Image (spheres, rainbow, N blue to C red):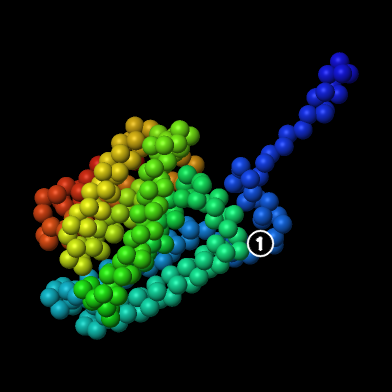
């Protein structure tokens, strides 16, 4: 008995932090004092994305305020939509630039933390949000036309990282046994699809129909795969921890964005647009 106790006491469990991103993350946090760079992650870009959505809404409102008497009656002041649009646009631009600068510094000084996000099956999906935010803000820029060369160059700058992330995520589902979609599928997996749809939407507004259709088809194909996988795997919110349950709204956001993208490609709100738009009702009812 004494020999067995001695043998048990001599066993030590050693965890290699290089193979465990979360452990390495904790070690870095312990060694360095907490700062805004260590606490910041790609999920914070949801702030800029929400601002971008509001800017897009006010842009549409300012374009049609002179045509709709009901809106004019509610607002009372004809110049309010354009003023609100400019204010929100500059505010969202400042927020997005600030977050981008801070996250760039995080990549430089705390690269291991960014690497742990990139290797995490949920965190990697949030890396799409910065580029989605820039694409949404690009569509609302007030002083650049969609046909300008600078506008097209910026589109390429923001779309290329989305394509690279697509190749990384979709490639691992086919090549890595431990990273199959059936094992890692979660509602945040739809963020990559939203990125493709936003890229197609922006390309259609520039008049690049072929590029828009290509990106839209890629996003729609993977949306079907992700949706079916999640539909078979999940039966409700009870299987998710409380912190991740708010991302269920993506089941509504993805088909709605697909409807907007196809509307820009086809030039009208036709039957496929209506099918995509109303499909979010069945998704929200199930979840």
Image side of residue 263 versus residue 158, left or right: left
Q: Residue placed at 47% from the left, 68% from the top?
A: 100
Image spot of residue 73 (x, y percent) = 18, 77
What is the number of callouts on the image?
A: 1
**Residue 96, located in which quarter of the rendered image?**
bottom left
Label 1: few (<14), some (14–19) or many (≥20) C-alpha neighbours in 10 Å: few
Does residue 30 appear to the left or right of 287 in the view shown? right
Residue 262 falls in image quadrant: bottom left
Q: Say above or below: 215 vs 89.
A: above
Q: Is residue 243 visible?
A: no
Quadrant where the C terminus is found in the figure: top left
Is residue 287 at all visible to an observer of this figure?
yes
- Residue 116: give x, y in percent of width and height: 55, 50
| Along the viewing direction, whichever of 244 and 42 lies nearer the viewer | 42
The residue sitting at 59% across, 46% down in the picture is 21
Q: Please determine whether, in this image, residue 39 is positioned above or below residue 147.
A: above
In the image, residue 243 above or below residue 40: above
In the foreground, 120 or 140: 120
Which quarter of the rendering shows the N terminus?
Answer: top right
In the rendered image, the residue lying farthest to the top is 1
Residue drawn at x 41%, y 66% as measured from the top left: 48
Instruction: Estimate the x, y position of residue 78 in percent, counting from the top left.
Output: 21, 83
Provide the residue designation for mark 1.
34
Per the image, label 1 sits on a secondary structure element best described as loop
- The residue lying at 70 percent from left, 60 percent from top is 32
| Left or right, 113 with reference to 33 | left
Image coordinates of residue 137 in percent, x first then y, are 33, 69
Which of these two is toward me, 68 or 25? 25
């Amino acid at each position: 008995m004494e020999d067995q106790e001695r043998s048990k006491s001599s066993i030590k469990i050693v965890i290699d932090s290089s193979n465990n991103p979360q452990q390495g993350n904790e070690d870095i946090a312990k060694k360095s004092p907490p700062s805004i760079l260590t606490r910041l992650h790609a999920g914070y870009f949801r702030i800029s994305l929400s601002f971008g959505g509001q800017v897009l809404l006010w842009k549409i409102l300012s374009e049609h305020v002179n045509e709709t008497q009901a809106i004019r009656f509610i607002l009372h002041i004809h110049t309010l939509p354009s003023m609100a649009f400019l204010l929100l646009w500059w505010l969202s631009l400042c927020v997005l630039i600030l977050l981008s600068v801070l996250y760039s510094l995080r990549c430089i000084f705390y690269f291991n933390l960014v690497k742990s996000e990139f290797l995490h099956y949920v965190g990697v999906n949030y890396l799409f949000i910065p580029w989605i935010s820039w694409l949404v803000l690009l569509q609302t820029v007030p002083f650049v036309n969609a046909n300008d060369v600078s506008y097209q160059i910026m589109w390429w700058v923001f779309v290329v990282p989305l394509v690279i992330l697509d190749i990384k995520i979709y490639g691992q589902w086919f090549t890595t046994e431990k990273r199959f979609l059936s094992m890692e599928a979660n509602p945040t997996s739809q963020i990559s699809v939203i990125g493709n749809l936003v890229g197609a939407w922006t390309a259609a507004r520039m008049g690049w129909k072929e590029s828009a259709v290509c990106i839209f088809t890629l996003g729609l194909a993977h949306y079907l795969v992700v949706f079916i996988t999640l539909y078979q795997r999940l039966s409700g919110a009870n299987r998710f921890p409380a912190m991740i349950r708010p991302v269920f709204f993506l089941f509504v956001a993805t088909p709605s964005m697909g409807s907007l993208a196809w509307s820009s490609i086809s030039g009208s709100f036709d039957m496929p647009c209506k099918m995509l738009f109303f499909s979010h009702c069945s998704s929200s009812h199930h979840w």
